[in-house]
Image: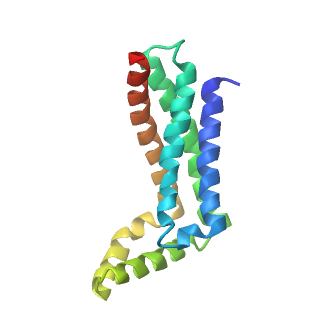
Amino acid sequence: MHPTLRAGLILGLSVTAWTFVMGLTGWYKSPSLLFLFWLVVPIQIGILVWALRGLTPASGYGRQVWNGVSISLLASILIYWGSYLFTTVAFPHYFQDIEALGRQMMAKQGLSAGQIEAAVKAGASMQTPRASAMAGAIGTMATGFLTSIIASIWFRKK
């Protein structure tokens, strides 16, 4: 299997697996553990740096960036569908749980009922399976692009 394809599959499946770990453990319902969702960023950076390091000797700077973007693109497709399945099939009440948690956290911060309603209403457009999955895919691409640029520069200096 081509190294770029392999890395894209590993990245996409790893991030999707972490998302399901968050769901199966119920950590996404806990105010003190919700931040663990963000571990997908260091997971992506680590896998991408590992993959690009393996591709470094045979490729120039532009090719390395392209490889990193290609890896991230493949991973983002898997992450999109993994997220979509997570919120529609595996955890269909995910958005209601997140909204309830958000309301609870805002109330603890001292926000009024009106402020909480306004915040919930402002974020409602992102609280759909498609929007959430697309945000994950776009985040994967952005992180992959920036990581690829930085890693490629770093590998060239070595």
Judge whether residue 85 can be spotted in this image. Answer: no
Q: Is residue 42 above or below residue 94?
A: above
Determine the residue positioned at 52% across, 73% down.
Answer: 30
Query: Residue 106: x percent and y percent?
Result: 36, 78
Q: Is residue 7 above or below residue 63?
A: below
Answer with left or right where residue 92 lies relative to residue 63.
right
Name the residue at the front extreme: 158
Judge whether residue 84 can be spotted in this image. Answer: yes
Q: Quadrant of the N terminus?
A: top right
Query: Residue 63: x percent and y percent?
Result: 47, 18
Determine the residue positioned at 48% across, 47% down.
Answer: 41
Tally of marks: 0
Q: Is residue 69 above or below residue 126?
A: above
Determine the residue positioned at 39% across, 35% down.
Answer: 146
Answer with left or right where residue 64 lies relative to residue 149.
right
Query: Residue 23: x percent and y percent?
Result: 62, 65
The quadrant where residue 111 appears: bottom left
Query: Residue 90: x percent and y percent?
Result: 67, 65
